[in-house]
Image: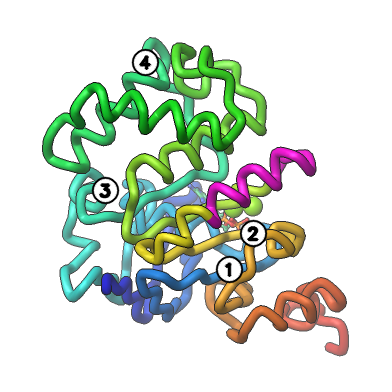
Amino acid sequence: MATLEIHDLHVSVEAENGAREILKGVDLTVKQGETHAIMGPNGSGKSTLAYSLAGHPKYTITRGTVTLDGEDVLEMSVDERARAGVFLAMQYPVEVPGVSVSNFLRTSATAIRGEAPKLRTWVKEVKSAMEQLQMDPAFAERNVNEGFSGGEKKRHEILQLELLKPKIAILDETDSGLDVDALRQVSEGVNRVRATGEVGTLLITHYTRILRYIKPDFVHVFSEGRIAESGGAELADKLEAEGYESYSTKGGATA
Ligand code: ADP
Ligand code: MG
Ligand code: MG
């Protein structure tokens, strides 16, 4: 069972007036098969956590450790992290001009599996994954994220998730900007991958609505760069009713 362990993670970004600490001591353990929801207000550092785990060069780790089955993730390059089984679906996926979805997926799968997938089975795999996500086959020939609608971008992220079969999947606001049908299809995709029992999922979200479709095993409230509270799925109901205000040190509800 793969285990991602984050211990006392501190992360800074370079701002105009010097380095600014965004993550202030995050502790979290995610095991294959588990689904963890990370919820928190805008600006609390959720995306910073996601990028830091994926190895984005803009984020400097100033303290703490991240390991995958005891291996030091922070020492790995972005590619090595992907090969080790860490997958990030970004909040704002980037365009890859001149590269079709089909080529992008095959190149990614080849890099991660260490060999090119056999063409015939691969074509079937892609076709069936696209059908399940109710994606038009013509989509495979479009350039990655070029002119994609919000829903198409998110479906494309889930398509990657289904085909690349990571050990740890970090999904950053995969629910944002989706209409109800797209939200359901995307959630069903996540649940299919989850049902294999082979992925540990970090589901980052601002709203509780996706948790009606994807029932988390654990919920963590993120506030001001750290986890302020952890609990089971019931914690999401409390957040839905009460919001995040009571977690803030600046002007909390009763402060
Ligand atoms: P969330 O995803 O929870 O909305 P973010 O991780 O995007 O939060 O941002 C947390 C804080 O860090 C915000 O105040 C944001 O402005 C700042 N921040 C994040 N990334 C950068 C960056 N690359 N450069 C400067 N500031 C950043
Ligand atoms: Mg945000
Ligand atoms: Mg974010």
Image vertical order of residue 188 relative to residue 31, above or below: above
Q: Which amino acid does label 3 sit on?
A: Ala
Name the residue beneath numbered marker 4: 99
Location of residue 164 (image quadrant): top left
Q: Which amino acid does label 2 sit on?
A: Thr
Q: Distance between the residues labelled 1 and 2?
A: 6 Å
Frontmost residue, 177 versus 101: 101
In the displayed structure image, the side of residue 160 where residue 207 appears, left or right: right
Q: Position of residue 177 (x, y in %)?
A: 72, 40
Name the residue beneath numbered marker 3: 82
In the displayed structure image, the side of residue 36 where residue 69 appears, left or right: left
Q: Which amino acid does label 1 sit on?
A: Ile
Q: What stretch is highlighted in magenta?
A: 176-191
Label 1 CA crowd tier, 10 Å (few <14, some 14–19, many 20+): many
Label 3 CA crowd tier, 10 Å (few <14, some 14–19, many 20+): many
Viewport quadrant of the C terminus: bottom right
**Tag 4's secondary structure?**
strand
Q: Where is residue 244 in the image (x, y as percent from the top left)?
A: 76, 74
Q: Distance between the residues labelled 4 and 1?
A: 32 Å
- Asked if the beta carbon under badge 3 is closer than 8 A to the nearest atom of ligand 3, the reply is no
Name the residue beneath numbered marker 1: 38
Frontmost residue, 17 versus 100: 100
Image vertical order of residue 30 relative to residue 92, above or below: below
- The tag earlier along the polypeptide, 4 or 2, is 4
Q: Distance between the residues labelled 2 and 3?
A: 22 Å
Q: Where is residue 191 in the image (x, y as percent from the top left)?
A: 55, 57
- The tag earlier along the polypeptide, 3 or 1, is 1
Q: Which amino acid does label 4 sit on?
A: Val
